[in-house]
Amino acid sequence: MSIKDYKILFISCFTAGILIISPSHAKNVNLQGQLSGWALVNTDQDYQTQIGTRYIPAVSGLLPFSSSLSLDTEISCNMYASTVFSHNQPTRSDNNLKTYRLWFRFYTNQFEARLGLQKINFGSATLFRPLMWFDQIDPQDPLQLTDGVYAVLLKYYFLDNANIWFWGLYGNNETKGWEFIPTEKKSIELGGRIQHPVPRGEMALTYHRRQADVQRGIPQLIRLAGLPEDFSDLASTLLDLKPATEQRFGVDGKWDIIVGLWGEAVFIHRNIDWLPYKYQRMITAGTDYTFGLGNGIHCLYEHFWFEISEKMFGNGEGMEFSAFAANYPMGLLDNFTGMVYYDWENKEWYRFFNWQRTYDNFSFYLIGFWNPDQFQIYQNLTETNMFAGKGFQIIVVFNH
């Protein structure tokens, strides 16, 4: 029996257990799901057309042990299939069935412990998130889908609204967040975060440590070092490819001073001796304000710096982006969002427009995009290549 078979068996047994105890013990057991279908047409890439469908069924349950201690859980899977058609290229298909969420949590009024496949995200930024360490949420995705991580997450909430987090990750062997080097297999990742209120806002410090799998990250590291691509063939004999320790340090804050203000900064160090760029910096500064015109126009601006360098605060190479987003509710059913990005290094514009209509269970999205032929933002997201150039996407969602 494969690992996937064991996962499916475990999910089935766990779900059955919840349903069995629910009539007499569980306060609430819910079965819900999200069915979506889409069609994307790229008019610049030989009129590439992608059609697809996705279904995410989910079971959630709540089991109170006392007035102060409860257990809840969520189990869901992600079933999807898509096909890409093109005039000059072979048809490509992709389909999969995988676990989407599988966690249970013990919690009280001030403490919670969550174990399993879960989403972990934090930070103050919206469009450019240096603290996107464990998720890959695309700001342009109206469904905000992202794979989870296998982790233990502990949180404690103080009475003054301060909170402290501790986590341990295991079994997440693929890249996540901004990572371009996967984590060493069978290694543990550890980290934590402390968040505290300050006048007119809050600030937080975050830390994470992991072992990076240099062997599997060779193609990306060779490109980062500026070496020829064919150098990868000799790398295993010429370079020290033992796992490298990676440490991340993050600081972020958010304030409400007439306008909303926030900032995130992340510093990363990898102890790879032969790599000329051992340090990585990402910084975002942003602001937002809602103008009292019509139904209210919410405007948001962020500026993002990304740089790799030989020294922690030395000059290096990187990129710089600005982004502006505006949202306007046109009525009870309709909502319009526009996003514009500017790449300061390549002098290029990115444009996204999204019209949404929502009913009780159905949502409809019409998305237009007009971007450069080479998509430079969100390079860690596999779907971004379809948004290079010009085109549109239609999404239909049914929630039950």
Image (tube, rainbow, N blue to C red):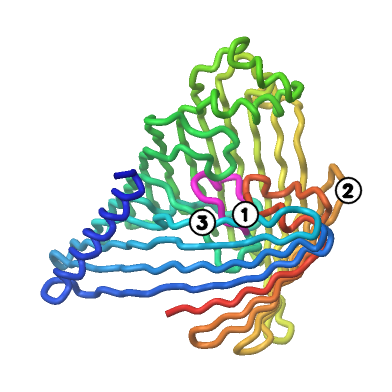
> Which residues lie in the magenta part?
129-138
Looking at the rendered structure, the kind of residue marked 2 is: Lys
- Report crowding for label 1: few under 14, some 14 to 19, many 20 or more residues within 10 A (C-alpha): many
Looking at the rendered structure, the kind of residue marked 1 is: Trp
Mark nearest the camera among 3 and 1 is: 3
Q: Earlier in the sequence, mark 2 or mark 3?
A: 3
For numbered disc 3, what is the local secondary structure? loop
Checking the image for residue 347, the label placed there is 2
Left-right relation of 143 to 287: left
Closest to the observer: 293 or 187? 187
Q: CA distance from mark 2 to mark 3?
A: 30 Å
| Residue pictured at 66% horizontal, 19% vertical | 233
Mark nearest the camera among 2 and 3 is: 3
Looking at the rendered structure, the kind of residue marked 3 is: Thr
- Report crowding for label 2: few under 14, some 14 to 19, many 20 or more residues within 10 A (C-alpha): few
| Image spot of residue 110 (x, y percent) | 28, 57
